[in-house]
Amino acid sequence: MYEVFEILLQKFNVTTYQVSKATGISQSTFSNWKSRRNLIRSDNAKKIADYFGVSVEYLMTGEEKEGGETYYLNDETAKVAQEIFENKELRALFDVQKDMEPDDLRALHNMALALKRKERGNIDDTGC
């Protein structure tokens, strides 16, 4: 089981420390799992699987169930999620917005659209 986790670490170029911080799972839990002192709890397996965008089945066995169970509903969603995961700035922006009030989220969205228009030359520096 831990071997699949190590493969995912390499594939996504992350460390156990980064996974620990993102999931709230202690590094000692990973150490105990690696040394086979403890089996991973199902709730932690789910957190890790979600972090990497794989199924718990894949995390535990290295194989998907027949029928190709996937985490995302379509390839476009998987691609966007991967882009967010790989880009530090996008991850930070996503993390900031997930707890925002709807009005604040709309304001952030409008500001991002205004910046994009400015970048394309559709408005000047004063916003006119």
Image (cartoon, rainbow, N blue to C red):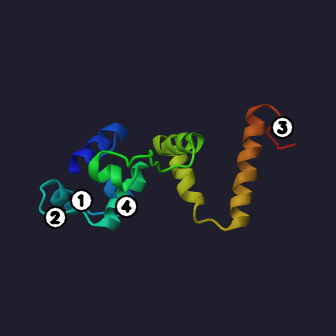
Whether label 3 touches label 1, CB < 8 Å: no
User: In the rendered view, would you say 110 is above or below 82?
Assistant: below
Q: Which residue, given by chain and number where applicable, does mark 2 sit on? A: 38
Residue at mark 3 to residue at mark 1: CA–CA distance: 49 Å
Q: Amino acid at mark 2?
A: Asn
Q: Tell me what residue is drawn at x 56 percent, y 53 percent.
A: 94
Whether label 1 touches label 2, CB < 8 Å: no
Mark toward the start of the polypeptide (1 vs 2): 1
Mark toward the start of the polypeptide (4 vs 2): 2
User: In the rendered view, would you say 16 is above or below 11?
Assistant: below
Q: Amino acid at mark 3?
A: Ile
The residue closer to the viewer here, 117 or 124, is 117
Mark toward the start of the polypeptide (4 vs 3): 4
Q: Which residue, given by chain and number where applicable, does mark 3 sit on? A: 123
Residue at mark 4 to residue at mark 2: CA–CA distance: 16 Å
Mark toward the start of the polypeptide (4 vs 1): 1
Whether label 2 touches label 3, CB < 8 Å: no
> Disc 3 on helix, strand or loop?
loop
Residue at mark 2 to residue at mark 3: CA–CA distance: 59 Å
Q: Residues within 10 Å of mark 1 (few under 14, many from 20)?
A: some
For the C terminus, give its image quadrant. Answer: top right
Q: Nearer the viewer, mark 4 or mark 3?
A: 4
> Disc 1 on helix, strand or loop?
helix
- Return the mark for residue 27: 1
> Disc 2 on helix, strand or loop?
loop
- Return the mark for residue 46: 4
Mark toward the start of the polypeptide (3 vs 1): 1
Q: Amino acid at mark 4?
A: Lys
Residue at mark 1 to residue at mark 2: CA–CA distance: 13 Å
Q: Nearer the viewer, mark 4 or mark 1?
A: 4
